Amino acid sequence: MRRISAKTVLPRHGMVRQPAFQEQTAARRVRHRKQEALVRLTAMAALCVALLGGFRLYGRICRHFDVHLSVQAVLQDPELPNGCEATSLATLLQYKGFAANKLDLAYAYIPREDFTESSDGRLGPSPEHAYAGDPATGRGFYCFAAPLAQGANRYLQEQGSSLQAVDITGVTVEGLKQYLHAGEPVAVWVTLDLSAPRTGSFSWTLRETGEEYIPYVNLHCVVLTGWGRGVCEIMDPLRGCRTVDQQAFIDCFVQMGSRALVIH
């Protein structure tokens, strides 16, 4: 029978395999780290490609436009199918940093008058004084720059702002470009498709003067945000930010009376 000395240490189960096991574990860790590094490098490469694409797109936009203002789109639908003025005003105010809501502007700030029926016929306001009808319905029409400025200034005053909305109706094309170069988007009155202004059979009697008023059927208020070579960029409350033919825009703007509004 073999005697075991007290100084003799018996090998425990698996002890002889310990160095190999440690080497395998270390190898797995190295492979895992390499895989993590590869994933990070792949993600960084994808990010670089995306950024490069964005820079190239921005470069094309900058080359295309002499001036381009980053204005966020605000759409009038579905709440205000006939509320392009309130929506354009909300766009201008949001560009200035205010949390303006198109519905609040339409019903609490912009002067508005409903139609009434009397023995004298259908009575309504002049668009030079107030919005005619209800912008949330099919019996809503429009207003021009003066009442829109009035509503905007009421809002700005309540916000404690020193900014002012200004009716710049009659502004020239060069004047529009100067406002854009100064960083000021401009609300302008054109038509839905930049075609010639049209009227229909609907009319009402102006409360102020007793005259008959026949409204435009294709009037539209948009925000001018960019000017380039043969094109303009607008924020269209029905379609969002888009580019349009510059000469068609100019012709329509002038035909509609060169009506415009800015906030500065």
Image (cartoon, helix red, strand yellow):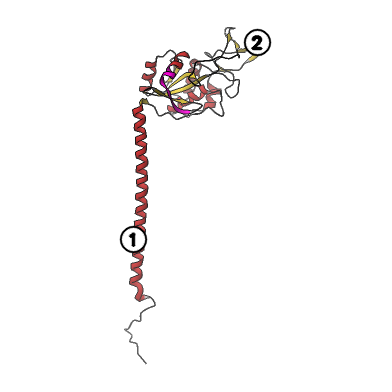
Whether residue 248 appears in magenta in the rendering, the answer is yes
Mark seen at residue 181: none
Labels 2 and 1: the sequence-earlier one: 1
Whether residue 199 appears in magenta in the rendering, the answer is no
Q: Secondary structure at mark 2?
A: strand
Residue that numbered label 2 is attached to: 121
Front residue of this view, candidates 200 and 26? 200
Q: Quadrant of the N terminus?
A: bottom left
Q: Distance between the Cα atoms at labels 2 and 1?
A: 88 Å
Q: Amino acid at mark 2?
A: Gly
The residue at 64%/15% (across/down) is 116
Q: Quadrant of the C terminus?
A: top left
Q: Position of residue 195 (x, y in %)?
A: 49, 18
Vertical comparison of 55 with 226: above or below = below
Specify the segment rendered in magenta: 240-250
Q: Is residue 209 left or right of residue 264?
A: right
Q: Position of residue 66 (x, y in %)?
A: 34, 24
Q: Answer whether residue 165 is visible to the viewer in this image.
A: no
Q: Amino acid at mark 1?
A: Val
Residue that numbered label 1 is attached to: 30
- Whether the residues at callouts 2 and 1 have beta carbons within 8 Å, the answer is no
Front residue of this view, candidates 65 and 195? 195
Q: Which quadrant of the view contains residue 184?
A: top left
Q: Position of residue 146 (x, y in %)?
A: 49, 15
Front residue of this view, candidates 245 and 58? 245
